[in-house]
Image: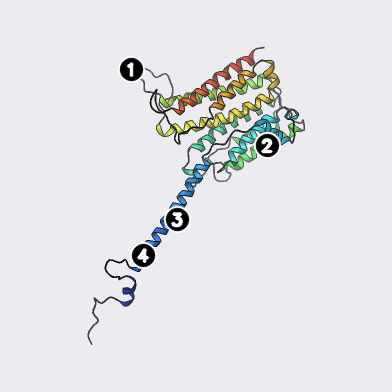
Amino acid sequence: MSEPDQNVPDPIDSEDDVAPKGRPSLKSLGENKNFKKALWVSAGVGLIMFGLAEYWSLEPEPFDVVEVAAEAAHVENPKELPLGYTYTSALIEIAETLLHKPGGFLINDVFPPSVLLDNIPNWEIGALIALRDATTALRNNIARSQTQSQEDPDLSKGEPFLYFDYRSWQLPSSESEYEKGIESLVAYRERIRKRDANFYARADNLRQYLEVLEKRLGDYSNRLSASTAERAPEGEERHSDLGRTPWLKLDDRFFEARGYTWAAMLVLKAIEWDFRDILGNKTALVSLQQIVRELEHSQESHLSPVILNGSGFGLFANYSLTLANYIARANAATIDLRSLLERG
């Protein structure tokens, strides 16, 4: 008996793999369909990730601090609110916004798409700094009658939680610690409602907060202006302590400043309500309203999807310099307000 011809294809293989010349085999068609399916799935996941990233990158809108306070106190007439209730409610709402806006608190995330974002996480840093400044002012100055008086127990307990590392995602997470800080602020606000907590709306207390605000605004204005800083000519000294902002850091500084001015603007609106008597007596209300207006301008929407930083009178706008201008004007008004409060 002759041996089988080695060149004769196996019947099973011939059905799946061998096809007439010019036509794909069944196996190659199956592989091609799987590849297309995987491609469509990848494209769908990528589109969902992109949509989430865009939605989560939207900056929160400002809120009405008096309305938020009246709603929390369940009163129809805001004039019935106890002194300090609006200020504390503004701090609580700012903190709640940081934690519960679309996407939640993003800066400590380690998974996509939030780990790929940098604009809104830097916005969160700025807003968090403003929240810390206002909470520290409440604990150390506004809630104490004098330097040697005892500090409020709820504030002394809650303020340190807000200074927890914002990059922590493991136990304890940043969010869990900040929630504890919010709980202490809520407890303090409830005691204000019951007239069992102190809030001293005095000129000296306000001046100490404005001194911190003045330095923050000056720093942000300086850092934003560095977007067009040039190297000093050889042999000359450069008077600024900041070099030109690296290209990849332009939007980081821009959005951090936007976050700070957003939160600081809301704190100042609460101050306008709770410190209205002292501001009116010292004819300082106009100066405070000027600060708020400049910070409101700093929150105007930008048309370009990327932060433009043209130079001089070039073709493209410089968003960093525009924001720096508003912040510098707010800083100047803050200095004027602090001077007015120091008189008499």
Disc 3 designates what residue? 41
Q: Residue 296's quadrant in the figure?
A: top right
Disc 1 designates what residue? 235
Q: CA distance from mark 2 to mark 4?
A: 64 Å
Q: CA distance from mark 1 to mark 4?
A: 71 Å
Q: In x, y percent, where is residue 55?
A: 52, 42
Disc 3 or 2, which lies upstream in sequence?
A: 3
Disc 3 or 1, which lies upstream in sequence?
A: 3
Q: Answer yes or no: is residue 141 visible.
A: no
Disc 4 designates what residue? 29
Amino acid carrying mark 2 in the image:
Ser
Disc 2 or 1, which lies upstream in sequence?
A: 2
Q: Nearer the viewer, mark 1 or mark 4?
A: 4
Disc 2 designates what residue? 184
Q: Are marks 2 and 1 in contact (CB under 8 Å)?
A: no
Amino acid carrying mark 3 in the image:
Val
Return the residue found at the far bottom.
1
Left or right: residue 94 compared with residue 32: right
Amino acid carrying mark 1 in the image:
Gly
Q: In x, y percent, where is residue 1?
A: 23, 87
Tell me the SS state at disc 2: helix
